[in-house]
Amino acid sequence: MSDIAERGYRHPDVLVSTDWVADHLDDPNVVVAESNEDPLLYPSGHIPGAVEVDWTRDLNDPLRRDYLDREGFAALAERIGLTPDTTIVFYGDKNNWWATYAFWVFRLFGHANARIMDGGRLKWTKEERPLTTDVPVRPSATYPAPQRDDARHRVFRDDVLKHVKAGGPLVDVRSPEEFSGERMHMPDYPNEGALRGGHIPGAANIPWSRAIDPSNGTFLNSDALRSIYEGEAGLSADDEVVAYCRIGERSSHTWFVLTYLLGYNNVRNYDGSWTEWGNLVGVPIER
Amino acid sequence: MSDIQNRKPADAATSLPGRLGETVELLSWAEDRAARIQLLIDLGAHFNEVAVSPDVATRPFDEAHRVPGCESEAFVFAVPRPDSTLDFHFAVENPQGVSARALALILGRGLNGVPPSEVVRVDPELVYTLFGRELSMGKSMGLMGMVAMVRELARDAVKQGDAAIDDTDDAEQAGRGRPAAGVKGVEA
């Protein structure tokens, strides 16, 4: 039995339990999709029937720094057998870090029937549930994809600068060392992230992983989340919040927590993040 | 971008020491990314060949041997052989560290018994040759950290070898009155 409904989330139906997924493995109206950081994980074993949505090959434009376009999304949906009415459940490694990233990109195309499997791959494997190396062949589907709409959930640098000048709240979800500007790269290696270290002025530092119970990868309950994001970071549900990290993947996790678990109405993910801001000429930086 | 990133795996293989080149060449035969990933998974299945045994180190492992930046919680240890080469042993504590285990097997199988002066020349960006460029920065830095730690342990062995040679030479010089001839200046 799942305790998701008892955690006080604003939109609890956006999460499904491992039990729920186990009960819907043969449901033709459900697509289970694994999204990982480690490219070897899915081929080495995944939830039976699960497809892979790879963040580099499937979600990113191969040339421009941007996400896939309408045609790309339609092709991806066709490959994984997704229609606008199909429920897609994402899960993955790193406490669903990449799963929420995929979820966020699907929201840019307005796909509302998306869920996250609470606990991700960690919880599924800890419960010793079955894995398979068989790659499913799902019936092809037609998805009349709309144009990607970035306005609601994504923010670009010019608007971030206005947000900073207006004193709007930001959440930097990177590690404290990245936030402070301490060098993060290994000795003998160039810092491939940015020319400058530090953070966007006014940002609160709440590392993304604090929203997770590390013992099983599940999300903390709403009281614990409010204690972190409202008690420590000073956010409130009516704020216009900008979340960022290095390239926008970790911050998609925090975007998910604030938008769906705490019910914030206006949270946008700045996927340009520090790799853009830390290289921009003339923008303010704090350390 | 370093030279190794621009080379095809088969070309890169020719400049790698020990059996490391053989593995890179094997991967170069993979028809596509999926085949290469499957080969890496198959290699990783043999991780026990290079896993840390209790006679090498016991948990909790010495933090000095933890690979910095590796979220697979990898540790690397080096045990000297009588011929002054090294055997590398690895621990990957995160059960989801599939790539880390594959890389550990490749490094251990490829570099055990290779002179440390050759090991220090292995470019950590070998990771891109093995796994491809489609890695997150976190993943690539963690894997490159494993190569870097192997190099660091080899570098220590080279220094210790230099010191031993210097000591011997000093003794010989004192005893026989001839100049020292130690090995110097290995570049990493």
Image: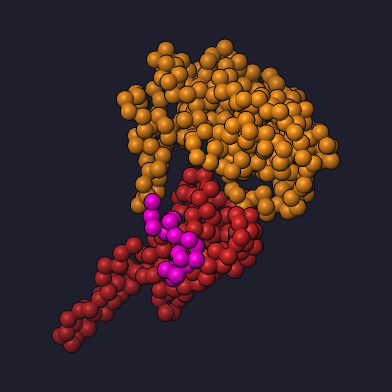
Chain colours: A orange, B red
Point out the image quarter for the N terminus of chain A.
top right
Nearer to me, B89 or B174: B89
Indicate whether B144 appears above or below A166. Answer: below
Question: Is residue A190 shown left or right of residue B179?
Answer: right
Quarter of the rendering containing residue B125: bottom left
Point out the image quarter for the C terminus of chain A.
top left
Question: Which residues, given as a range, are shown in magenta?
Answer: B1-17
- The reply to whether the magenta stretch includes residue B138 is no
Nearer to me, A21 or A269: A269
Indicate whether A68 appears above or below A36. Answer: above
Question: Is residue A20 shown left or right of residue A59?
Answer: right
Q: Is residue B24 visible?
A: yes
Residue at x 27%, y 74% (from the top left corner)? B183
Residue B68 drawn at (x, y percent): 45, 50
Question: Is residue A60 shown left or right of residue A166?
Answer: right
Q: Is residue A209 visible?
A: no
Quarter of the rendering containing residue A86: top right
Residue A32 drawn at (x, y percent): 74, 39
Residue at x 52%, y 65% (from the top left corner)? B24
Residue A164 drawn at (x, y percent): 41, 18
Residue at x 53%, y 48% (from the top left corner)? B134
Quarter of the rendering containing residue A73: top right
Residue at x 54%, y 37% (from the top left corner)? A61
- Residue that extends furthest to the bottom in the rendered view of this protein: B176
Residue B106 drawn at (x, y percent): 54, 64
